[in-house]
Amino acid sequence: MYNALASLSIRRKESIAVTIRRLLSQAISEEAAVDGKDVITDAVRRAMRDVLKPTEDRLAKLASKAARMAATATYLNTQVIGDLGRRDVLQIYNEARKRAAAYLREQDDEA
């Protein structure tokens, strides 16, 4: 390590003591910057979590409502088809599910 310090000092045209002080100062500054970055990153993450949590909760509730409504509509549609006298209700239901899945896989034309 001494040889590396001596070589660096010669290249920089400074004493070994000055080189050591400069390197220590630089290392301490870099370490402080990393520590500060971690503190700032944690603070930003907490703030974002606090801001986004109500929106996430609201979206989860809406998705739950949408799922219940879709299930209700599916049942009612199947019941109405059966009440109209169709005997192939299960076949109609399965075909509708296949078409719905294909529809959901399609790309939206709007960007």
Image: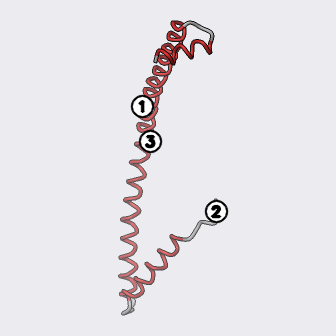
Q: Residues within 10 Å of mark 2 (few under 14, many from 20)?
A: few
Q: CA distance from mark 3 to mark 1?
A: 15 Å
Q: Residue at x 41, y 58 (%)?
A: 63
Q: Position of residue 51 (x, y in %)?
A: 44, 38
Q: Residue at x 51, y 70 (%)?
A: 104
In the figure, 10 relative to 52: above or below?
Answer: above
- Provide the secondary structure element on which disc 1 rests: helix
Colour scheme employed for the rendering of this structure: secondary structure
Q: Residue at x 41, y 43 (%)?
A: 54
Quadrant of the snapshot with the C terminus: bottom right
Q: Position of residue 102 (x, y in %)?
A: 51, 75
In the figure, 71 relative to 91: above or below?
Answer: above
In front of the other: 4 or 53 = 4
Amino acid type indicated by mark 3: Leu
Provide the residue designation for mark 3. 52
Amino acid type indicated by mark 2: Glu
Provide the residue designation for mark 1. 42
Provide the residue designation for mark 2. 110
Sooner in the amino-acid sequence: mark 3 or mark 1:
1
Amino acid type indicated by mark 1: Asp
Sooner in the amino-acid sequence: mark 2 or mark 1:
1
